[in-house]
Image: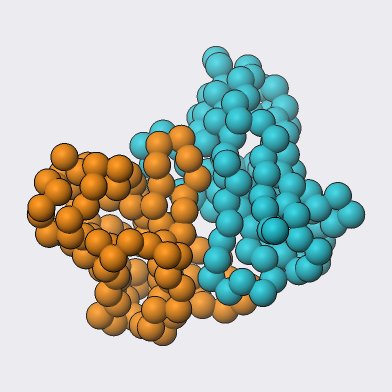
Chain colours: A cyan, B orange
Amino acid sequence: AQSVSQHNHHVILSEAASLELGCNYSYGGTVNLFWYVQYPGQHLQLLLKYFSGDPLVKGIKGFEAEFIKSKFSFNLRKPSVQWSDTAEYFCAVKFGSSWGKLQFGAGTQVVVTP
Amino acid sequence: DTEVTQTPKHLVMGMTNKKSLKCEQHMGHRAMYWYKQKAKKPPELMFVYSYEKLSINESVPSRFSPECPNSSLLNLHLHALQPEDSALYLCASSQGTDTDTQYFGPGTRLTVL
């Protein structure tokens, strides 16, 4: 069965620390990959996406993600976080044959302390 | 502009009430979606409309009734809801192609008493 998993449910780190959030999926075919962020009290915003081409994708707010096909992974990174990065982060996958269906991971709550 | 708007922001209703949630986008997107999000959980897909026709219904109870009057508008009619239906209801839209991106509205926070 197709699935999306995020390794960490809660991450606490200090400002200026580096962040890496893991995302893995199970599916052998074509995928479209997304990271969304949900700041407290706000709606889901797209951070970045991968469809094809360069597996290293740069998004907004200094985030980037790397697609490693052999590992079925799409990890999100930011070299130096700020307090304003406190939010819930969702990995989402559209599996090749499933038009319209975006499957989300469970989410990772990130708390950045000053 | 990637804005999807939703009204109302908050809704409180009794189990015998009938109410509607509204969603609007002016990006020319041909696909629109309803999701349900419980606290601390990811969004769960409910319905997908493509070119104003219902294309996906994720086995949602009939007390939720979607409607797409035109390509810019999406409604969700609510009737005889249960307290466990209390959640954030999100609307999204996308171009409607195989490699498209969904953009989300702010949601309607629904409380069923």
Quick one: A107 or B99, which is closer to the camera?
A107
Q: Position of residue A37 (x, y in %)?
A: 53, 43
Q: How many marks?
A: 0
Q: Position of residue B42 (x, y in %)?
A: 50, 45
**Is residue A29 at all visible to an observer of this figure?**
yes
**Looking at the rendering, which quadrant does residue B65 occupy?**
bottom left
Q: Residue at x 33, y 46 (%)?
A: B88
Question: Which quadrant of the figure contains the C terminus of chain B?
Answer: top left
Indicate whether B58 appears above or below B97: above
Indicate whether B66 appears above or below A114: below
Indicate whether A15 appears above or below A65: above
Question: Which quadrant of the figure contains the N terminus of chain B?
Answer: bottom left
Q: Residue at x 42, y 70 (%)?
A: B57
Q: Position of residue A10 (x, y in %)?
A: 59, 26
- Residue B60 left/right relative to A66: left
- Residue A75 left/right relative to B18: right
- Residue A110 left/right relative to B112: right
**Looking at the rendering, which quadrant does residue A53 occupy?**
bottom right
Q: Position of residue A111 (x, y in %)?
A: 55, 24
**Residue sticking out furthest to the right:** A70
Quick one: A11 or B88, which is closer to the camera?
B88
Q: Residue at x 67, y 22 (%)?
A: A16
Q: Residue at x 85, y 57 (%)?
A: A69
**Is residue A49 at all visible to an observer of this figure?**
no
